[in-house]
Image (tube, rainbow, N blue to C red):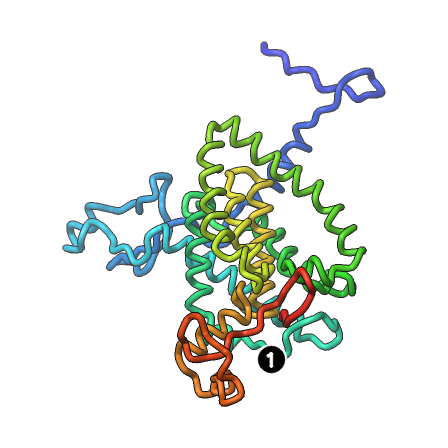
Amino acid sequence: DVEAPPKSRSISDGGSIDFSEDRSRRLCFYLKLRKNWIPDAPLRLSTNCGPVTHTNRHDELEYDADVAAISGQPTEPMVILDLFLVKFLKFMLMTAAMVLLSHGLVKTHWLEWEKDPKHTIANLILYDGNLVVMDMFVFFCVARLYREQGVDTLAFFIPALFGTVYPSFANVLDFMKHSVSLYEIHCDWPWKLWVFVMCIIPLAIIIVYAHIQYSIRKRILLQKLVELGLAILVGIVPYASNPNFHLHHWYFGWLLGMLCNLNVWWSRSTMAFLWGFYANGIAVWGRDPILTCAVAFYRSTDQECPFMDSYQPGQEDQQVTDDDGSGYKEMEQPDWWTCTGYIP
């Protein structure tokens, strides 16, 4: 006869605690956080059973070859959307839901959150819809979301939801109602905002340090440094010296979020939180250009829009010259050093 293994004794009996049940609960909770709401699988069309998404572990549909041969149907179903597009569409739908949620919250009168009263979802789609889709595609590719589990999980949605709501909630505090530009930082930031930034810096250092350590262990540090360098070279350097440069929080969340692309929970959570920043920015204020009025002035004068006639020099402005030969008076530039000029 085989003896049954002895039962774990309680602490009062001088024994140890059996944590197996507790571990099972934690594992179950973790799996629920990581479970996709929509399967990560190609969308296929079978002539026998209609659209299907169920796949086996090789991401290939199990197919009854005998039935297919008898019916004369092809042995492989037709692919409607491959796995890349399925994940990208889920990412787009998740972003759209976050934008609608954030826009709806700031439009709620009883919350009294700061917003652009003229901004609407219709204007966002009409004037910036193509740019928003390109933002999502670049973020999706650089963040390697096509290689990772789809974003339709609680593990991604919860920090993204927090990032979507936090910027508007924080603006309830008067000292938070400021932007990030040289003009604002030098001329308008109150001391309370400086204290807040000093408190956030240690958390940012911890996150950066964790990314560096993980990259060293996985031997991908050089790759991540190249990504960071390219992001700065393309996303910051061409604009930073312009006096109109305004680091909108949609741009901040987009640029930094896609660099937090390590396949570990705290990096993905940071990515999701920053993507929520992006969604909040375009939902509440619109996808405003980072060079603000300079972009509007350039496009209006380049297209010779009739409402810009007031910027054409008259008799009293003969001494005014335009270095670029556009035929318009130069726009007054903000000066962060002397705190003069207009900044939106």
Q: Which quadrant would the N terminus be assigned to in this image?
A: top right
Where residue 126 sits, quadrant-wise, is: bottom left
Q: Is residue 266 above or below residue 293?
A: above
Q: Which quadrant would the C terminus be assigned to in this image?
A: bottom right
Where residue 179 sits, quadrant-wise, is: bottom right
Residue drawn at x 65%, y 55% as measured from the top left: 162
In the picture as drawn, the residue positioned furthest to the bottom comes out as: 315
Left or right relative to 344: residue 324 = left
Q: Is residue 112 above or below residue 21?
A: below
Q: Disc 1 residue type?
A: Lys
Front residue (pair 80, 87):
87
The x and y percentages for residue 194 are 76, 52
Left or right relative to 305: residue 175 = right
**Residue at the spot of label 1:** 118
Where residue 171 sits, quadrant-wise, is: bottom right
The x and y percentages for residue 267 are 57, 41
Left or right relative to 169: residue 343 = left
Front residue (pair 63, 127):
127
Front residue (pair 58, 335):
335
The x and y percentages for residue 253 are 57, 54
Residue drawn at x 65%, y 62% as measured from the top left: 336
Front residue (pair 198, 245):
245
